[in-house]
Every structure is written in structure tokens, then in C-alpha cells.
Image: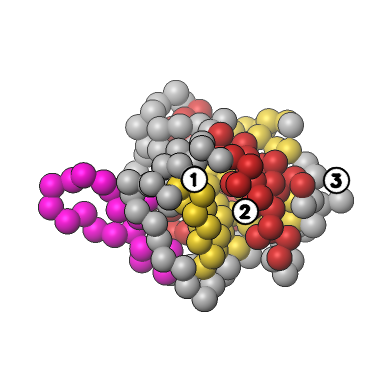
Amino acid sequence: MTSLELETLHGPARVHLDPAKDARGALVLGHGAGGGVTAPDLEAATRGALAVRFTVALVEQPYRVAGRRSPAPARQLDGAWIAVLEALRAGPLEGLPLVTGGRSLGARVACRTVDATDAVAVLCLAFPLRPPRRSGEAPSRLPELEAVRVPVLVVQGERDPFGIPPASPSRTVVRVAGDHGLKADLPAVADAVSGWLSDLAV
């Protein structure tokens, strides 16, 4: 795995690149709000993607590179993500179909920017459908998923306190053991990712 820093309008982002031999596509994943790219489910997704010849790029947002744990505003996250994808498409991932995604917050960013990044599909690990245990009725984030017009895979823990998004004609939802951390059955996460990527028409 190699690392590179890419400049964005909101500071440098860091990309960890794991090339696949004879790659047929690339999977670009972002991290959760308070975590990094070493999250167990991101590592499991990486294993699943490499097994079916998808190069993997794990992206650290500028706020994480700068050492902050609190995420930047959505417009900054989205802008940095788009800039990173443009640089990767023009550089190490040139010519490869791009599947974007991430865990939790990273999945939301990928959904919101799918048109701008020209992704062929989106992978959502632990999509945070609705914030748990808040006073009043918290708004659902389902519209972010519903707006995506390319194939989507959601891998969600059966006991995720954020809820489980519904499936749709273009959205596959795989339930695995565990909660929002997706740590209970990592082989199931890897298998879900590899099986879905294998079936993509890329």
C-alpha cells in the first residue's frame, strides 16, 4: 500500500492506495466522522474488493489529516472528496470505473457527490439512517440514498441503533451480525462487498 497527499481547497487529503493486479475497477472509500481509514469494516471491504480485482483507495479527509476529530461542514467534506476523486481519476486510477463509498459519514458524502464524481456505483457501510436517542423526531437521511441513481450496496449491522435502510430496485441491503461498528462478522462484510462488486457490470 502506498500513501499520497492531494491538495484540496480545504487542506491536504491523504490517500492510501492498494492496487489490484489486472484491476477491473477501483473502490474509493471514506471514513466515519470520528474514525479513520483503519476501521475494521473498511479493512474488510478492502480485502473483499482486492479479491475480485478492484484497486482500493482509502481517503482521509483534510480535517483528519490536520489532527481534528470533529468533522468539517458537509460542503467542505463534499468539496474535498470531489477534488480527491478528480485527482485520482487523472492519476493512479486513470481509466478505471470508479465505485465510491465509505462508512457512516463517508457513505453520506459519497451519496451526495455521486453525480459530481461520475461513480458507477456506491458502497455504504453502516449508513447512518437516523441519529439514535435524540429528543424529538430526527430527520431521516434516506433522501440521500434515494437520490442515488446508480447501483448501491448497503452493509448494515442487524442491531445498528441508526436503523436499517430499506432495499429498492437499485439498492441492495445486506444485514450482518453486529451494530454500527460492523465488527462482529468481518468475513461477512468482505463477502458482501466482493459478491456485489463481482456482479457489477463494469
Up the image or down, 37 lies above or below 55; here it is: above
The one nearer the camera, 89 or 97, is 97
Left or right: 57, with 165 as reference point:
right
Q: Residues within 10 Å of mark 1 (few under 14, many from 20)?
A: some
Quadrant for the N terminus in the image: top right
Q: Residues within 10 Å of mark 2 (few under 14, many from 20)?
A: many
Q: Residue at x 51, y 36 (%)?
A: 183
Asked if the residue under mark 1 is in contact with the one under mark 2, i.e. CB atoms within 8 Å, the reply is no
Residue most toward the front? 177
Q: Residue at x 35, y 53 (%)?
A: 163
> Mark 2 sits on what residue?
192
Quadrant position of residue 140 = bottom left
Quadrant for the C terminus in the image: bottom right
> Mark 3 sits on what residue?
21
* SS state under label 2: helix
- Res 86 seen here: no
The one nearer the camera, 30 or 63, is 30
The range drawn in magenta is 128-146
> Mark 1 sits on what residue?
177
Q: Residue at x 52, y 76 (%)?
A: 169
- Amino acid beneath label 1: Ala
* SS state under label 3: loop
Q: Position of residue 184 (x, y in %)?
A: 51, 37
- Res 190 seen here: yes
Alpha-carbon distance for marks 3 and 2? Answer: 21 Å
- Amino acid beneath label 2: Ala
Q: Position of residue 125 (x, y in %)?
A: 51, 49
- Amino acid beneath label 3: Lys
Q: Is residue 136 magenta?
A: yes
